[in-house]
Image: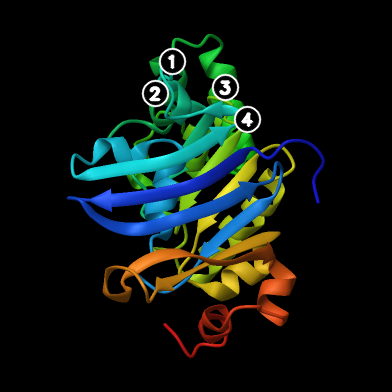
Amino acid sequence: MSAGRPVFEVTGLNVYYDGDRVVADVELEIEPNRITAMIGPAGCGKTSVLRSLNRMNDLIPAATVTGKVLFNGEDVYGDGVDPLDLRRRAGMIFARPNPFPRSIFENVAFGPRSHGMSDVENRVERGLREAALWDEVKDRLDASALGLSEAQQQRMCIARALAVNPDVLLMDAPCSALDSKATGEIEDLMIALKLQHSIVVVTHNHEQAARVSDMTACFGFDPAAGGGRVGRVVEYDHTDAVFTHPSDKRTEDYVTGKLG
């Protein structure tokens, strides 16, 4: 266990779309410099919870979030919080790479420039080095990012988030569009990055969670709410415990493949 205050403290979190509750009463503490995986069957609210941590759900007009999310002790839904600065400190990596139709350099420089940061060139290099991409692209930074392989594009998107020096990386199924070799590269990168950053990753591959994560939150459905289609955290523990000695039948069914 890591010493110090949790980077995220989530209490009583509920997410609604068009007034219908899709996630109920989530309680989580995310530890610093750990990889925390969110697993569970499709539609049980993993991504909705992930997007609540840095207020990405604000961008969905139909979404409403209640409850409390503390980020390094600060209520992210409190008065005076700047969502853009929050998303700098808790950067999001999406399921598919989303490079801009610009050069590799301009892609990674976008974040620092948007936030008025100095030393853009140094930040670009540092981000690419942290993302284990610098040696592959250092001689063609002016080339279009669209010419990179899909795996390289995803690492470049990670570099873009790293260039603004975030505390946390929020990853929404970052390997779902990649082949097995590229997936291994991203997993190795995640393990290296946790030395400097906390990582929360939604994954649809429970074997990936077993390989890379320190803590695992297993989501399932609440049969007593919303016709059984409301998601909640049914188990949260060290990853080894979740996969070898699950305490909830829904977790056991999911990690053993009985529930997809």
Q: CA distance from mark 4 to mark 3?
A: 24 Å
Image point (53%, 24%), residue name: 164
From the image, state whether disc 3 or disc 1 is nearer to you. 1
User: Does label 4 or label 1 sit earlier along the sequence?
Assistant: 4
Identify the secondary structure beneath mark 2: helix
**Residue corresponding to mark 2:** 84
Q: Count neighbours of disc 3 (C-alpha within 10 A) and say few if under 14, some if 14 to 19, many if 20 or more.
A: many
Q: Count neighbours of disc 4 (C-alpha within 10 A) and say few if under 14, some if 14 to 19, many if 20 or more.
A: some
Work out whether residue 138 can be spotted.
no
Which percent across, then down, holds residue 76?
A: 47, 29
Vertical side of 250 occupied by 71: above or below: above
| Residue 115, disc | 1
Quarter location, residue 236: bottom right
From the image, state whether disc 1 or disc 2 is nearer to you. 2
**Residue corresponding to mark 4:** 72
- Disc 1 + disc 2, Cβ < 8 Å: yes
User: Does label 3 or label 2 sit earlier along the sequence?
Assistant: 2
User: Does label 1 or label 2 sit earlier along the sequence?
Assistant: 2
Q: CA distance from mark 3 to mark 2?
A: 19 Å
From the image, state whether disc 3 or disc 2 is nearer to you. 2
Vertical side of 190 occupied by 232: above or below: below
- Disc 4 + disc 1, Cβ < 8 Å: no
From the image, state whether disc 2 or disc 4 is nearer to you. 4
Three-letter code for the amino acid on which mark 4 is drawn = Asn
Image point (38%, 36%), residue name: 55
Q: Nearer the viewer, residue 95 or 142?
A: 95
User: Does label 2 or label 4 sit earlier along the sequence?
Assistant: 4
Which percent across, then down, holds residue 15?
A: 34, 50
**Residue corresponding to mark 3:** 123
